[in-house]
C-alpha cells in the first residue's frame, strides 16, 4: 500500500469543486489526506465550507500584492510546504483558482497539479468557456480534468464528462449543467491520481512528427 498523498486545494470563490472532493475524501472514496485549502481571495465562500469540513484554511491575498507572479507563488509554496504538500508528498488541485500560476511553480510541482476546465478541451480554453461553447453552437460540451503544464488549459487530459447543450440554453443554465458534472469528474480524477492509476508521461513535444 503506497503512503497517501497530502492534498492542497487552491480556490478563489465558491469552492463547489473543492467541496465535492473533500466530501468524497470524507466518505473514504479517495485515499488522500486533505491537508490545506488556500485562497487568494479573503472573501472566498469556499473558505467557510472547508472549515466546516474540518480542513485547515489559509488566505494569501493577491489583491494589492506588488511583487512578481513567481514571488506570489513562492508564498503559496511556503504555505503548501507547511502542510507537507511537497512535490514528493503532495498533490495540488486548482479549483476555481482565478490566477495564472508561474512556470517556476509548475516546474517545481511537475505533474502534481490538476485543474478542471468547464469545456471539452482542447476546445474553448481560457475564460468564459461555457459562453464560447454556446457562441460556437456546439451540441455537446462538458468538462475536462487535466494535469497543469505551462500552457493555458493544455496539459495532459485525465478525464472528461459530456453534457448536451439544449435549445434555449443560456450561459447560466449550461454552466450549471456542466458544474454538476465537474463535481463528479474532479473527484474521480483525484481518486485515479491518488491511487497511482494515472500518471502524466512527458512527451518531448505534442506536435512532433507532423
Ligand atoms: C468551475 O466552473 C471550474 O471549472 C472553473 O471555475 C469554476 C469554479 O467553481 N475553473 P467552484 O468554485 O468550484 O464552485
Image: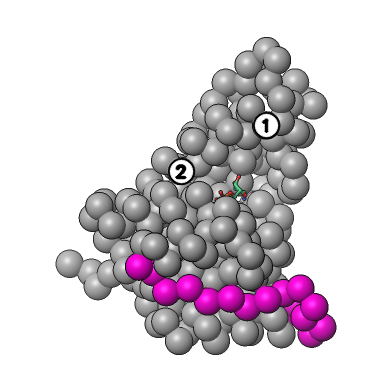
Residue 8 place in picture, x, y as percent: 46, 70
Residue at horizontal 68%, vertical 60%?
98
Q: Which residues are magenta?
A: 54-70
Residue 79 place in picture, x, y as percent: 52, 83
Is label 2 in a helix, a strand or a loop? helix
Is residue 93 among what the camera can see? no
Residue at horizontal 44%, vertical 63%?
50
Q: Residue furthest left?
A: 1
Q: Which residue is under mark 2?
A: 183
Q: Main secondary structure of the magenta part?
A: loop
Between label 2 and label 1, give the one nearer the viewer.
1
Residue 11 place in picture, x, y as percent: 57, 62
Residue 64 lies in quadrant:
bottom right
Q: Which residue is under mark 1?
A: 172
Relative height, residue 132 to residue 28 (above, below): above
Is label 1 in a helix, a strand or a loop? helix
The answer as to whether callout 2 falls within 8 Å of ligand 1 is no
Please tell me whether residue 56 belongs to the stretch shown in magenta.
yes
Q: Quarter of the image containing the N terminus?
A: bottom left
Amino acid at each position: 500500500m503506497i503512503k497517501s498523498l497530502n492534498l492542497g486545494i487552491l480556490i478563489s470563490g465558491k469552492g463547489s469543486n473543492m467541496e465535492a472532493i473533500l466530501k468524497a475524501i470524507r466518505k473514504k472514496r479517495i485515499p488522500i489526506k486533505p491537508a490545506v485549502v488556500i485562497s487568494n481571495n479573503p472573501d472566498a465562500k469556499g473558505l467557510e465550507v472547508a472549515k466546516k469540513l474540518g480542513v485547515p484554511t489559509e488566505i494569501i491575498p493577491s489583491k494589492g500584492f506588488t511583487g512578481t507572479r513567481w514571488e506570489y507563488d513562492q508564498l503559496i509554496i511556503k504555505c503548501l510546504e507547511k502542510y507537507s504538500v511537497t512535490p514528493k508528498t503532495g498533490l495540488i488541485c486548482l479549483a476555481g483558482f482565478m490566477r495564472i500560476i508561474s512556470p517556476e511553480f509548475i516546474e517545481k510541482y511537475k505533474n502534481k497539479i490538476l485543474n478542471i476546465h468547464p469545456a471539452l478541451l482542447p476546445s474553448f480554453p481560457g475564460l468564459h468557456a461555457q459562453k464560447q461553447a454556446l457562441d460556437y453552437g456546439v451540441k455537446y460540451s462538458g468538462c475536462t480534468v487535466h494535469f497543469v503544464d505551462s500552457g493555458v488549459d493544455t496539459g495532459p487530459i485525465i478525464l472528461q464528462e459530456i453534457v448536451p447543450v439544449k435549445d434555449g440554453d443560456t450561459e447560466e443554465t449550461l454552466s450549471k449543467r456542466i458544474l454538476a458534472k465537474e463535481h463528479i469528474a474532479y473527484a474521480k480524477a483525484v481518486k485515479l491520481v491518488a491511487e497511482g492509476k494515472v500518471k502524466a508521461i512527458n512527451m518531448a513535444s505534442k506536435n512532433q512528427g507532423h
